[in-house]
Structures are given as structure tokens and as C-alpha cells.
Amino acid sequence: MNITFIVKEFPKTSETFIISQVRGLLNLGHDVKVISLRKHRKTFTHLNRELFDRIMYLGYEGNTLRRFIKTACVVISHGVYTDFLHHALKNRTLLSILSYPAIRSHFIDKADIILVHYGDLACNFSFLNNIPGFKKPVVVVFHGVDVARYLPSLSPLERARLWDTMTLGLPVSHFWLERLQSLGCPVEKLRVHHMGVDIERFSLKRKFPLKNILRLVSVCRLVEKKGIDIAIQSIPKVLKAHPGVEIIYDIVGDGPERHKIENLAAFYNIQKRVVFHGEKSHQEVKKILEAANVFVLPSRTSGNGDMEGIPVSLMEAMSCGLAVVSTFHSGIPELVKNGISGLLVDENDIDGIASALMRLISEPDLVIRLGNNARKEVVKNFNYTHLNVELESILKDIIVHYK
């Protein structure tokens, strides 16, 4: 198959699941191209040259004026300029999409199928299927924030255009499948397809029962929906109940909430127990995970409505055999079975997070049991090798039956 991905940024440190899909389909023998609106600010030195040669960055292709004129002629001549301009201006991507002629000639015309990550981006490209002679099957992967915030902001007519453009939607969880249905998407156009992780890279390391050391870790962007401030506020409660336990909390990642979280740690006088690592390479993240025994991610719905899909960082931690403490949020309960492969509490529940951590201290063997079960869950249902084969089968089936 010739497969064209359309994404916002590539490669992006917080979206390794897209890199995994691209590599997985390449390894399965398919010709994969990537159209990316922007270059990510950090260079992935570990990506090979072959993969970089398959990427087109829209904001960097050719002369802007020439691209604008060509694009304007194409979209106006085919009567699709209204949708095009509406979505492009609404999402501030007009300049990025000016490479339309290059996209079509070098990538999309040769594609058997188009795979778009995030529903808001799919809306930007919905004009393509209105162009005569340009029908291609379009698969849209829905992750969370697009369904939680963007799609509800559209009118029913605008959402209907997306459903019409889309051959199949792949929400990353059953939670988001149900939300898409509630927004009017026909159920026959939806199928859950999980993101996954490399279970060989994040392999099981033998964990030992807690012995007066609680080594916590969180790996995430430091944004409101991750709830790291909740984890910080739970630590003094655990220390008060278990003064003889040494707590070290490694926080890997960066983001707009970092300064606030650092101040919170200082306010509770636990700044010496909390290590802010910033962004780290995959290899460095793996080492930090292997040194920990409990992964904490108190995810929640942020004030602006942003929500998780199913956090890949949780999958990576579980694949390493870590006990996880998280929340009943979005699709997380589809990954973490409460009391079996991890402990879940309500969103924004500081006492709940503290109680879960105290339970792990009081029941040290539970850390091992949860970690082993977590590994089994990821190997069975979130192994990216198996999921890429499943994706390959889905795409092949669409191409065969597409009219």
C-alpha cells in the first residue's frame, strides 16, 4: 500500500505513537509518506535518513506567493474555497496549507489511502474530497483533545462534512467512540484502535517490594490535564502518615505548568524530594522508569476542556512492570484495571492519590502484583507490533471495499 499520513508536527516528542505507526507500516513493507504542517522544534537524531526523506513540511516548501496563487486557482476553480478558507483561517493554518499543489503531485495523488491524526486537522483537509477526480479513502485517528474541545465547537453541519469526508474514524478508546457518537458520527464509521508501545524497548525489570523507599515517577508534558500538582500535594500527607518512608519523586517533562509545580513543591517544603528532569531522550526515560517502583499520573479534565486519550506514558510504565496510580479519567480505565493492574481514584482527589500511595507502602507485595499484571495487560492489548498489524488489516480492507 501507498499510505500518506497527514499530521501537525513530525516527529514530535510527545507523539511517539505516530512515529511508531509510520515505522511499523514501513517495516511491514508499505510505502509511507508524511505530510506535516510544521517541523518540531527538537530534532530527532535517532531517526534514520530514510524516514526524514519521506516527510514534506508544508511551511517550508517553495515560494509562498507562488504557492498562494496556485492554491487559490485550484480551490476557487473547483468551488471549494469557502470550506478551505473557513477551516484554514479558523485553525490558523492557511499559510501551511498553501503547499496544496506540491502535496497533491508528490504525495496524495500516489497514495492508496490517507491517514490523518486528529479530527481538527482532518477538517482542514476536508475540501480535498470535493475536488473532481480526487476521491481517496480518508481514515481519521481521534485522540482526545480534538473530540473534547474542537468538534463540539463546530456546527452540526460542519461536523457532518467531516463525517462525509471520513471513510473511517479510529478513536483511541471506547470512551471517545461514545463521545463521537454523541456528536452525530454514524457508528458504522467508527472503530476503536488503541495506540501502543514497544514492549521490547520498555521491558519488564524485576521489582522488589517497597522497603522504606517510595520512588515515584511521572513522565508527561507539564500541563493542567496531567494533574502533577495533585501528586505534589499528596506527598506531605503520605509523609505525615509514614514519617519513616523516604520519598523521591522524579518528574520528566516540561511545559507551561512547570514553574507553578516547582513553587508548589517549595511551598510544601518537599523541593529536595522532587527532581525536575525536563525533557529527556527515550533511553534516559527508560533508565528513570527502571529506577522507580510507582508511576503517578493524576490526569483530569482541564479548565479549558482538554482531556487525555489513553496516555502512552502510562503504557510505557506498565510495560516496565511499574505499579501505576492514576484516575478514572477518559480512556484510562480501559488500560488500567483498578485493583488489578493499577490503582485509580477520582479526578482532583488529593486524598485519594495519597491513600493509594499509602496502600502501596502498607502492602508492599501489591506493588509487585500490580506491576506484573500491568505488564501482562500491555503485552496483550497495547503491543504496538500487534496494533500495527491490526492497522494494516484495517487499511487494506478499506482500500478493497472503497468506492
Image (cartoon, grey):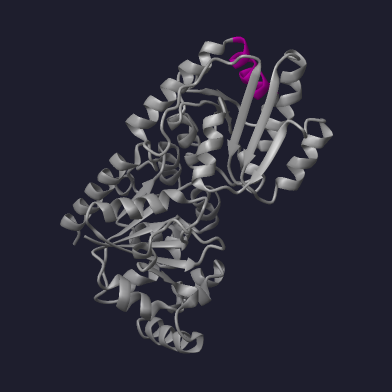
Quarter of the figure with the C terminus: bottom left
Compared with 55, 207 (above or below) is: above
Residue 287 placement, left or right of 166: right
Q: Position of residue 298 (x, y in %)?
A: 61, 33
**Displayed quadrant of residue 222:** top right
Compared with 276, 356 (above or below) is: above
Residue 328 is covered by the magenta coloring: no
Q: Position of residue 176 (x, y in %)?
A: 44, 42
Nearer-the-camera pick, 369 or 212: 212
For the question of whether residue 327 can be seen, the reply is: no
For the question of whether residue 238 can be seen, the reply is: yes
Q: Which residues are magenta?
A: 351-362
Q: Position of residue 21 (x, y in %)?
A: 35, 51
Nearer-the-camera pick, 157 or 153: 153
Q: Position of residue 148 (x, y in %)?
A: 53, 47
Residue 3 placement, left or right of 356: left
Residue drawn at the location 43% of the way across and 36% of the way down: 202
Compared with 388, 290 (above or below) is: above
Secondary structure that dominates the magenta span: helix
Quarter of the figure with the N terminus: bottom left
Residue drawn at the location 53% of the way across and 34% of the way down: 289
